[in-house]
Amino acid sequence: MARFSPEHLETAREIIARYPRPKSALIPLLHLAQEQDGYVTDDAMRHIAELVGVTPAEVLGTCSFYEMFKLHPVGTYLVNVCTNISCMLCGGEELLAHASERLGVAPGGTTPDGRFTLEEVECIAACTEAPCLQVNYRYVTNVTNDDFDRLIDDLAAGKLDHEVPPHGTLARVRQHIPADRTAGIVPVAEAAVEPAWMHANEAPGAGGDA
Amino acid sequence: MTITDAPKIITRRFDTPDSHTITRYEETGGYQALRTALGSMSPAQVAAQVKDASLLGRGGAGFPAGVKWGFCPPGVWPRYLVVNGDESEPGTYKDRLLMERDPHQLIEGVLLASYAIGAAQAFIYIRGEMALAQERVAKALNEAYAKGYIGKNILGSDYSIDVVMAWGAGAYIVGEETALIESLEGNRGMPRLKPPFFPAAKGLYMQPTVVNNVETLSNIPWIVSNGGETFAELGAEGSKGTRIFAVSGHVKNPGVFEVEYGVTTFRDIIYAPVYGGGIRSDRALKCFIPGGASAPWFYEEHLDLPLEKATVDKAGSMLGSGAIVVMDDTTDAVAACLSVVKFFSHESCGKCTPCREGTNWLEKILRRILDGYGRPSDLDLLMDVADNISPGIAWPPKQTTICPLGPSAVSPLASALGRFRPEFEAHIARAARAEAASAPAQAVGLPGGVA
Ligand SMILES: Cc1cc2nc3c(=O)[nH]c(=O)nc-3n(C[C@H](O)[C@H](O)[C@H](O)COP(=O)(O)O)c2cc1C
Ligand code: SF4
Ligand code: FES
């Protein structure tokens, strides 16, 4: 499967409708493709291009800028170890070395069974809980070597399935704007008027633009 | 020590269970500021409160939010509001917590700001790697729509707006506001040149756009409820209210602390038991980064400076994103410097040459020094490359680049080399000794052979 499934297509259309210009939906749609297939396939990029009205090359242009988008299959679990300054000061590089040894792959590599991909990453905003890592973008903090080994064992045994969905899934709750509640999302040109409330609650005679 | 009893403002719900749910938010005074504003305040009055509060932006540059809102050219519609939730400056840890633990506070801030500036639509752009923050904000938006706080005719008023969550996909540079706008338009996240592309004039879709940080906007409900002047009673002359600082690195008690802005000192926040708790194993302090990886380093003699914007600027650094990274005397200055430079080199978007090439060369040269292959000429070479990115290597930095990322890589280098030059020289001397020892082998050496 690579083009969007009917269900994902519906979600994709809903996402596109949330922006004044369809192209703005590109990043969320690339994430949706990655959620469906585990990585971003060529067919998915073609489908996205059709949906937002740009060329597949433009989709690839955006896709290739961002590190989270994978153009090739990665492990079910993407293990990202931070080695930036706060983590480095507290053993982040040693943790990465241990992870590499335990998984038997260098950073960037995937285990032969296709379960784990190890990456060295930049600061993930958990600097006061160093050293830290993410598995499929779920945090594990203050990690010792033993913690790491246990984590890998638990993931491999499926014990963390309820907390850590397979690679590609970010938020498990989607925004949904009810049709009867929306203010009305329109293209830029159609919004070129002063909003109705700009002079609300003004004392008579007062005026001016905020 | 000056530990003030200032109230907590934006983190006050952090310890409440379920602080992220709408029920708990409403129970603790949530959405009352919005009710007050829509019931009795004009958009201009809301903006005036924020101006009175002298609320400085918390994203890094510290620009007054109220003043920024006033920069939108009059009569040009539509305007957009964009929330910068891309937090990724090494050492920085606060916006993620604000989104995970109190998403409704942020949403209420967004609604008030959009009301004040007359935004046609608002976007909350969350860093791609923050799955839980995305989940909490999405859920909070759904709840707020269902309760009539967002959408058409909010709370029965004329105010209507849609608030949409957007999310990134891994690129530090997207935290820079014009790059964030590019990303929100579905493009590669490369900064635009300012001028002319100041967001307030030509931002999202080339329309007037206000970009504010998550922490900045999280303050707005409290300011509207309690009054801008009440907020301005807290803090120091040029730095009002409270502010979150993350203290990480070699401290006993690393953490995220909301303190009165401008009053608390570096010594307080690093050493006080309620904050950092002192250096681990009671070792000596070597240096600390006062405001995120982009900031020049501080030392022992700066400990008694207050965490106040103007004071820290004048002392040659910045409070930036509120990230204090502490290093003890076991730290190798060259290794720490390389760590920070490597970050900027990796995150350079590649749009301009001095940054793309320069940061890369800085990293390579530092790496060879640290690995014991440095040359005596390397220190001058480092400064020469740095000077091409940020002429004069001064503070505040000048730049030959499109955005300040390039010069950010120069800060740690100028700091480390300025203060700890002998450590660089020692690594280089190690290389020289190794070379001398291997010289005879090289003399006999085979073509291309390495001794
Ligand atoms: C390289 C670079 C990275 C930045 N990263 C962030 C960021 O992650 N979050 C943020 O709020 N501001 C970041 N900024 C600052 C923004 O450009 C912008 O000034 C800020 O979002 C404005 O919000 P404020 O006025 O409320 O602080 C960054 C700036 C630069 C130059
Ligand atoms: S300074 Fe660096 S990050 Fe900024 S625009 Fe130039 S290349 Fe990109
Ligand atoms: S430096 Fe590792 S999370 Fe920030």
Image (cartoon, coloured by chain):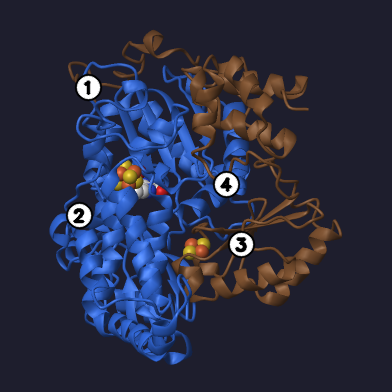
Chain colours: A brown, B blue
The chain carrying label 3 is: A
Location of residue B18 with respect to B42 vertically, above or below? below
* Real-space CA distance between mark 1 and mark 2, rounded to the nearest whole angstrom: 44 Å
Three-letter code for the amino acid on which mark 4 is drawn: Ala
Q: Nearer the viewer, mark 3 or mark 2?
A: 2
Residue contact between numbered discs 1 and 3, judged by CB atoms under 8 Å: no
Q: Residue at x 41, y 82 (%)?
A: B442
Q: On the same chain: label 1 and label 2?
A: no
Q: On the same chain: label 3 and label 2?
A: no
Instruction: For mark 4, give the secondary structure.
Output: helix
x, y (%) of residue B329? 38, 87
Occupied quadrant, residue B189: top left
The chain carrying label 4 is: B
List the residue tagged with mark 4: B133
Q: Residue at x 55, y 68 (%)?
A: A129
Residue in front for this viewpoint, B165 or A57: A57
List the residue tagged with mark 2: B388
x, y (%) of residue B377? 23, 73
Q: Is residue B402 visible?
A: yes
List the residue tagged with mark 1: A209
Residue B137 in the figure: left or right of residue A113: left
